[in-house]
Amino acid sequence: MSIAAIESVLQQMRATALQAGFAPAATQAAAEPAASGGFAAELQRSINNISDAQQHAYGQAEAFELGKPGVALNDVMVDLQKANVAFQTGLQVRNRLVAAYQEVMNLPA
């Protein structure tokens, strides 16, 4: 897997996050990608966004179960699905990164 392919996956993750309604973790980091740590920082921000989505969804589900006003079932279900899609995307990115690492490790020296 080449750097271009990894960059393509990151762009897809960013687009999916924006469509799902997740804002970037830090607006300065988006403006200064080199100063923010590059690929590792982007990966960490993506993992944090996935975690935040899951925590928000589980919080919404708990609020609905407790009968708090203003929490509708359809909102809870949508939030849970968004968190699930984000997790599945992160899982697939991890799988591709592991496959790329294994491919690089198996290259002849």
Image (cartoon, rainbow, N blue to C red):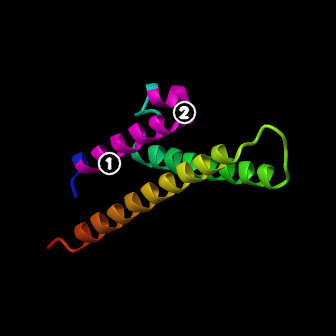
The quadrant in which the C terminus is found is bottom left
Q: What segment is highlighted magenta in the picture?
A: 5-30
User: Which three-letter amino acid code belongs to the residue tagged 2?
Assistant: Ala
Helix, strand or loop status at disc 2:
loop
The quadrant in which the N terminus is found is bottom left
The main secondary structure of the magenta stretch is helix
Residue, x 39% and y 61% (percent of image)? 92
Compared to residue 17, the image places residue 64 above or below, namely below
Q: Earlier in the sequence, mark 2 or mark 1?
A: 1
Residue, x 45% and y 43% (percent of image)? 42
Q: Which of 3/85 is in front?
A: 85
Q: Which residue was labeled with disc 1? A: 9
Compared to residue 96, the image places residue 31 above or below, namely above
Residue 34 drawn at (x, y percent): 40, 34
Say few, some or many: other residues with alpha carbon within 10 Å of mark 2 (under 14 / 14 to 19 / 20 or more). Answer: few
The reply, left or right, for residue 69 in relation to residue 22 is right
Residue 90 drawn at (x, y percent): 45, 56
Residue, x 28% and y 44% (percent of image)? 8
Picture mark count = 2
